[in-house]
Image: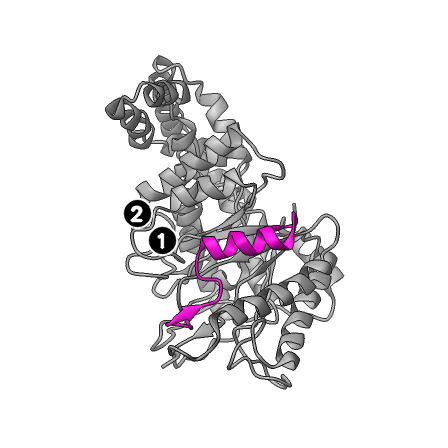
Amino acid sequence: MSGLPLSQDAIESHNDARREALTDEYDSLGRALDRRGVDIEAITARVQAYTVALPTWGSGRGGTRFAKFPIAGEPTNIHEKLEDCAVVNQLSRATPRVSPHFPWDFVDDYAGLRQEAAALGLGFDAVNSNTFQDQPNQPHSYRNGSLTARDPAVRAQAIAHNIECIEIGAKLGSNALTVWLGDGTNFPGQQDLGASLDRYLDSAADIYAALPDDWRILLEHKMYEPAFYSTVIQDWGSSILAAQQLGPKAQCLVDLGHHAPNVNIEQIVARLHRFGKLGGFHFNDSKYGDDDLDSGSINPHQLFLVFNELVQAELNPREGFDPAYMIDQSHNVTDPIESMLSSAEAILGAYAKALLVDRAALSAAQEADDVMMAFQALRRGYRTDVTPILAMARVRAGGALDVLAAYRDSGWRARKAQERRPVGLGAGIV
């Protein structure tokens, strides 16, 4: 594809210099897995078929509460964001879709934007609405809420924005709308907690009614921020209750950082799947709260356990099981392209390790109440170094064997630093 941002010849040259070592490591792992009764080629094929979407906003530097420190060459508009996302996909061959956010990614010509993305080897995933910020020339403020605001004019404005996002998404080829809002309270007594949920359900029902037949609405919960005393959709319980009331096209989206500390997220995954409401994931990692750190950088074992439940769900699918997978991170101190490359590899690595779990042995141990052997069935998959599988899957798909080395050798960031308008300093949110 001639419109790709990096030289494919350079990627092939990069791979040729490392191919012999990869083949040796892959064959060695294949022999080890064969002794466990596992076909490495079957695992590699599954990994090669797995994809995760990129957020357009993740291609730029994020900010803290206090400041944003931009990086030279970061994108300043949706067109430059698509370029950077195309770099990630060309090297990883695992991120062929982007998830846009409106109004940040508004353009005049959405048919043209879809063609532009296709020329870069990209399609569009779920679209995201924004009612957690006021925009220039917006008639009504979201200061006191959006979909749950007491003022009906504010609610009508927020509903109309979500419906506009659906209309834009249809032009882009999307089939899902993700709704997250920061509505809630910071003081006891600030709102009637029951009435605010009722207003949310009424507003969400209006948005639901505007969904095309083949669309889904993904309800995203978050425990806190910017509402610190109470958040209207604060956990998976509120989310699944709302999804059940709205109807079959409503499902729950799990952001790995949107939970209370030490919550068992993998159990939530299993519960949502049990009731047919597991709609998708926003992958990231956290140490203290909603940190939006790189996937697998803090707790890779938890990521593996989440994928263990997802693989189990794949083997026992409920009607409509088709999760939307997306990276959702804030890259404050790294090159965003490098973080997204690293995160895609961590996500695929967790998936590959979950595929290696001996399901028969695990089930037998569970049925026998053999706690240690059940645990060891999981541990054996987690301990396996799947790096050769990930690299071989990328190379066979035309990606880079060592994604970070290939990216740095390309000089992409330095070139863009010369070509793109600089991004100004951010003051943070304090």
Looking at the image, residue 317 lies above or below residue 120:
above
Residue drawn at the location 51% of the way across and 38% of the way down: 274
Q: Is residue 76 visible?
A: yes
Q: Earlier in the sequence, mark 1 or mark 2?
A: 1
96 or 202: which is nearer to us?
A: 202
Identify the image quadrant of residue 149: bottom right
234 to the left or right of 130: left
Give the magenta part as a residue range.
225-250
Was residue 245 drawn as part of the magenta stretch in this picture? yes
Look at 69% across and 61% down and name the residue there: 166
SS assignment at label 1: loop
Q: Amino acid at mark 2?
A: Asn
Task: Give the numbered dot on residue 127.
Answer: none
Label annotation for residue 299: 2
Residue depicted at 63% across the width and 83% down the height: 138
Q: Amino acid at mark 1?
A: Asp
Q: Residues within 10 Å of mark 1 (few under 14, many from 20)?
A: many
The image quadrant of residue 227 is bottom left
User: Percent x, y for residue 351?
Assistant: 43, 36
Q: Position of residue 299 (x, y in %)?
A: 30, 47
Give the CA distance from mark 1 to mark 2: 7 Å
* Residue 363, above or below 123: above
User: The C terminus appears in which quarter of the rendering?
Assistant: bottom left
For the residues bearing labels 1 and 2, Cβ distance under 8 angstroms: yes
Q: Residue 172: x percent and y percent?
A: 70, 57
| Above/below status of 305 relative to 228 | above
Residue 156 picture location, percent across and down? 67, 75
The colour scheme is one colour
* Residue pointed to by mark 1: 285
Q: Residues within 10 Å of mark 2 (few under 14, many from 20)?
A: few
For the N terminus, the quadrant is top right
Instruction: Identify which residue, 88 or 236, lies in the foreground.
Output: 236
